Amino acid sequence: MAKIIDGKLISKQIKDELKAEVAKLKEEGREICLAVIQVGNDPASSVYVGNKKKACEYIGIKSLAYELPEETTEKELLDIIDKLNNDNTVHGILVQLPVPEHINEEKIINAISPAKDVDGFHPASVGALSIGQKGFVSCTPAGVIQLLKRSDIDITGKDCVVIGRSNIVGKPMGMLLLRENGTVTICHSKTKNLKEICKRADILVAAIGKPKMIDAEYVKEGATVIDVGIHRMENGKLCGDVDFDSVEPVAGAITPVPGGVGPMTIAMLMNNCVEAGRNQN
Ligand code: NAD
């Protein structure tokens, strides 16, 4: 029987630690502020933005909501980002992705000041991570590291296999595990012998986007299995990239879906906002 890594509990601990720090900063007259920009009204984006606002409220971070119409031009959005970059009462800037097709996502990411890039998507943030300099780290992989550390799972010298090489999860995940002294292999859709590679892992991270793809045949006895995937099944329930029922009896520790990696993403976003506030004040 695997130990279940409780992301709900760990994310609550992190948010409570941040809440206490934000309260202290407020006593010193310092208020942290996050600007959240949404263009259009994609329902999934609205849910994510709503959850971010709720987390800000819980922790005591001021949130500025920019709800812009679908027809907002790229220039208008860039002008708002420029204004926020130069506003020293705003510490973090987040543009909810995806943006409508007529707006170039790359240009938007690049326009956010790296000092306020709480999503950690700016090339300067990504570059800093890869050469071990200070900078914001993408929230989901940063959350995975916290799950491991706060569950006393040592990364040093461990064989770590990440499945997925996206810019927001797989690649930064690999860099972070490397920073923690893991021996890292990154697999992707063109990887040969995926099962054999995964079966060597002490720590296996699945960020594939394929429901229940990873079953017990991919997992070494006693391995830690982190499931980043989120999918809604036909019965309305959520599942991950890992077939939990098949893997749980083999693994040493495992994250459930829901209640594993999911809640950590927002907790780490809040952590980045507090860090941005600390750095800029
Ligand atoms: P993505 O589609 O950008 O990347 C998927 C990666 O998986 C690619 O690099 C691809 O090469 C690899 N892949 C696809 N099929 C494969 C196969 N058969 N074998 C090996 N590798 C394969 O997805 P993403 O944005 O990295 O997200 C991955 C999953 O994580 C999705 O289910 C997404 O919903 C979820 N996600 C969760 C959170 C969270 O907060 N928990 C955040 C971001 C993404």
Image: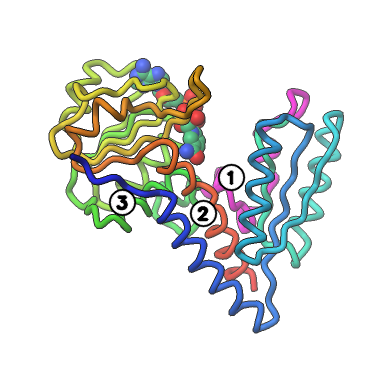
> Looking at the rendered structure, which numbered label has been put on residue 267?
2
What's the magenta region? 100-125
Rendering quarter of residue 41:
top right
Identify the secondary structure beneath mark 1.
Answer: loop
Circle 2: element type? helix
Rendered position, 32 above or below 119: below
Mark 2 nearby-residue class (10 Å; few <14, some 14–19, many ≥20):
many
Position above or below: 127 against 9: above
In the picture, the disc for residue 148 is: 3
Spot occupied by residue 110 in the image (x, y as percentages of width and height):
65, 42
- Residue at which label 1 appears: 122
Disc with the residue nearer the chain's start (3 vs 1)? 1
Q: Is residue 120 magenta?
A: yes
Task: Give the distance between the C-alpha atoms of the residues marked 3 and 2, in whole angstroms.
Answer: 15 Å
Quadrant location of the C terminus?
A: bottom right
- Quadrant of the rendering where the N terminus is positioned: top left
Q: Counting residues from the N terminus, which is met first, the one under dot 2 or under dot 1?
A: 1
Q: Position of residue 225 (x, y in %)?
A: 27, 37
Q: Residue drawn at (42%, 28%), measured in percent from left and top?
A: 239
Relative placement, left or right, of 194 versus 58 is left
Residue drawn where x is 34% and y is 41% of the image: 255
State which image quarter holds ligand 1. Answer: top left
Residue 189 visible in this rendered orientation of the protein: no
Badge 3 amino acid: Leu
Residue 111, numbered label: none
Residue at the front extreme, as displayed: 235
